[in-house]
Amino acid sequence: MTSFENFPKPKKNISFFVLVCLFILMVAANHPVKEIQEPNLVLIPGGSFKMGSKEGDSDVRPVRKVNVTPFYLAKYEVTNEEFVEFLNSIKVEVKNNEEVFYRGKQIYDLICDGFCSNWQHEIYLDNGRFKLRPGSEQFPVVLVSWYGAVTYAKWLAQRTGKPYRLPTEEEWEYAAGSGKLHQKWAGTKSGGKALSKFANLCDAFCAVKNWRDHTLRDGYAYTAPVGSFKPNKFGLYDMTGNVHEWCSNRYYPSYDLSLVSKEDKEEELYVFRGGSWINNIKSSTTTARYSAEPDYCTTVVGFRLARGVE
């Protein structure tokens, strides 16, 4: 701790302003600023592709041509280590020792309320500080709401001066499918055992026994550390499986908004994509869509960041 006793005594030729500057430098030397963790980004080239699928649920239709401008997307999903730094850097309110709120909106949940079979909590509160269970640092953060993902992106943007955000649904599908290739799963067009090289899905080791697919062998009961599997053609990891990922878009049950009812348009739901550790092969394609309220928190949904090309 810097002491005023060691502060140099003023001389006639040294101004008060200079003394203040010296004191600030002394404090900074004793309290170095922690380096900000920024995501490792991949430049996704622009292009056009046919978004959607003639297979699967009706909300992935109609298939249509979409143009995507170049953008950056994080190689990995946001980790527990990164998210804890964020939680400890903002002023939050914790209700019932469980729900974490920021400016009146729930951004995180400390307690698992769904898909919790023997789930070990990775982030906990201890004497007013958020801490990590040892060994969980590089696992993808879960139990984070859409509000939480958006708030994290804004927080990082403010700290770095760079326009971080969530990817749009169009950007996400384009990047996951390796652009015009539009691969059915991120990194491959082949399902079955080969998919275990690219994705953490509900395999023979999955914690949810009733949903196990015994043709898969990824070796993880829950989430896996980010980057544990092979990347897709763009060098992106875990775009299929591990955790679903929030997108910036509102969800509507059709890509043709003229077919969407007034009630569906009024319901506030947001999109998450990619499948997770509880999903099977069919429900984890790059076109599959999911949705939830913006304050929804669960062990199967996380996020990754995007950034525009400046």
Image (cartoon, rainbow, N blue to C red):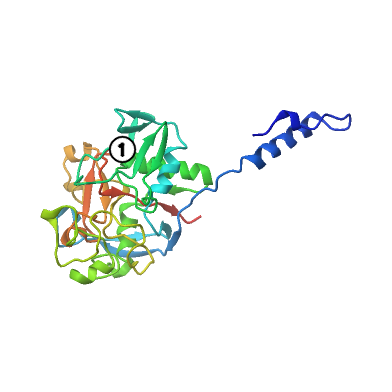
Secondary structure of the residue carrying tag 1 is loop
Percent from the top left, x then y, of residue 175? 34, 62
Instruction: Say if 146 sits above or below 59 in the image.
Output: above
Residue 190 visible in the snapshot: no
Residue 115 as seen in the image, left or right of residue 10 = left
Residue 150's image quarter?
top left
How many circles with numbers are drawn on the protein?
1
Residue 38 higher or lower than 85, as above or below: below
Residue 129's x, y, as percent?
Answer: 43, 35
- Residue drawn at (48%, 56%) of the image: 309
Comparing 296 with 25, the one in front is 25
Tag 1: amino acid: Leu
The answer, for residue 38, to whether it is visible in the render is: yes
Q: Split into 4 quadrants, where in the image is the N terminus?
A: top right
The crowd level at tag 1 (other Cα within 10 Å; few <14, some 14-19, many 20+) is many
Q: Position of residue 117 (x, y in %)?
A: 19, 46
Q: Position of residue 304 (x, y in %)?
A: 37, 52
Q: Nearer the viewer, residue 198 or 57?
A: 198
Q: Which residue is mark 1?
A: 110
Tell whether 268 sits left or right of 81.
left
Write the residue at 20% across / 54% down.
278
Q: Name which quarter of the figure residue 133 lies in.
A: top left
The single residue placed furthest to the left in the displayed view is 210
**Of residues 175 and 310, the one drawn nearer to the viewer in this rendering:** 175
